[in-house]
Image (tube, rainbow, N blue to C red):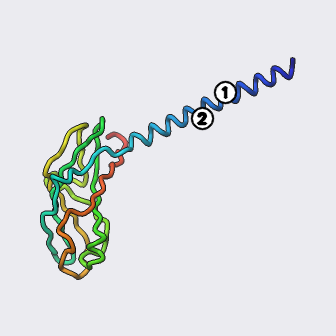
Amino acid sequence: MKQLKRKNRILIIIALLLCLIGSLNILIWHFFSDNENNAIIVQEKSYLREYEIIKDEVHIYCVVSLYNQGDSTASVKLIGDFSQEVKGGLLADSELEAYFTDLSADHVTIESETSMDYVNIEFVGKYAGTSQMSSRNLPAIRVCNVEKSFGE
């Protein structure tokens, strides 16, 4: 009889631990799924406009269109990959963060299932000495979620 009660307690403890682990998995999944990025660059409506060298900086001007395909509002920033321009000697750094010149902001907020078309952005990087750009194509651009501060 005593042994039966002990087995029942062990089974109850195991069941509670399994429930706890399942709940933690759900919470972790929910936390990370909220951080999924659902905003994308619409390539057909985006292009590199021009670039210029001002003193020791390279200013690269682009026009991008963004679409939020998710079911919630997204606050995003853009990171351009300029590794080709580093190899070519134009830029010192390969990753540059975009500045939304029309909005005077380093990130934008896009409502669910809406787009922002033809938004002017600017990348600024350190000039490395060669005054020619290796490609006039839009660089690879990552769309990154912006961490929300407390109270936002």
Residue 29 point in image, percent of width and height: 47, 39
> Residue at left 21%, top 50%?
42
114 lies above or below 123: above
Residue, far top:
1
Looking at the rendered structure, the secondary structure element under dot 2 is helix
What crowding class fits label 1: few (fewer than 14 Cα within 10 Å), some (14-19), or many (20 or more)? few
Left or right, residue 30 beside residue 20: left
Q: Residue at x 18, y 54 (%)?
A: 64
Residue 48 vs 86, above or below: the answer is above
Disc 1 marks which residue? 15
Residues at marks 1 and 2, CA–CA distance in whole angstroms: 10 Å
Give the number of marks.
Answer: 2
Q: How crowded is mark 2: few (under 14 residues within 10 Å), some or many (20 or more)?
A: few
User: Does residue 139 lie above or below 132 as drawn?
Assistant: above
Say which quadrant the N terminus sits in. top right
Residue located farthest toward the front when viewing the structure as drawn? 44
Can you tell which quarter of the image residue 134 is in?
Answer: bottom left
Q: Which residue lies under the disc numbered 2?
A: 21
Expressed as whole percent of the image width and height from the top left, the position of residue 72 reads: 30, 36
| Amino acid tagged 1 | Ala
Q: Which residue is drawn at 28% across and 49% down?
A: 76
